[in-house]
Amino acid sequence: MSEASEHIEYHRAGSVRARGPQIDGVQEGYWEWFRLDGTKMRSGNFTHGEQTGEWITYNSEGLPHRVTQKTPKNP
């Protein structure tokens, strides 16, 4: 298995849209998504490209708004 590398995606305006580790192009570990203004929009973990565990959606001020538990389809 390859080592994880940091992956960063950008909005057209240049600010960071998402960031997190990937292994062989597949999301793995903790990821974050951001709005155009830089406030955090969503965060959570991936295991082999599937959402797992606690996922948090943030309000427009960047404060936690909703927490969802994700169970992998193929544990």
Image: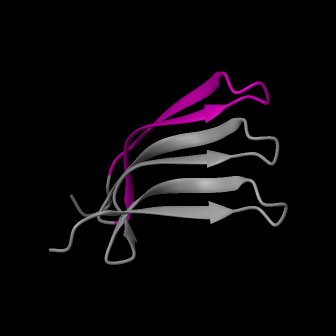
Q: Position of residue 56 (x, y in %)?
A: 54, 34
As drawn, the residue found furthest toward the front would be: 14
Residue 64 falls left or right of residue 29:
right
x then y, percent, for residue 55: 48, 38
Report the colour scheme.
Answer: one colour
Q: Is residue 3 above or below residue 57?
A: below
**Residue at the spot 79% in from the left edge and 30% down from the top edge:** 60
The image quadrant that residue 17 belongs to is: bottom right
Above or below: residue 63 compared with residue 38 = above
**Residue at position x 67%, y 40% from top?**
41
The one nearer the camera, 75 or 23, is 23
The verdict on residue 40 being magenta is no
- State left or right for residue 21 relative to residue 68: left
Residue farthest to the left?
Answer: 1
Left or right of residue 48: residue 55: right
Tell me which residue sits at (69%, 62%) in the image: 10
Overall secondary structure of the magenta section: strand
Residue 70 in magenta? yes
Of the 4 image quadrants, the one containing the N terminus is bottom left
Q: Position of residue 72 (x, y in %)?
A: 32, 55
Tally of numbered discs: 0
Quadrant of the rendered image containing residue 61:
top right
Residue 6 to residue 31: above or below: below
- On the rendered image, what quadrant is the C terminus found in? bottom left
> Residue at (22%, 67%) from the top-left corner?
3
Q: Please report the bounds of the magenta region as a residue range.
A: 49-71
x and y, in percent, of residue 48 in the image: 29, 65
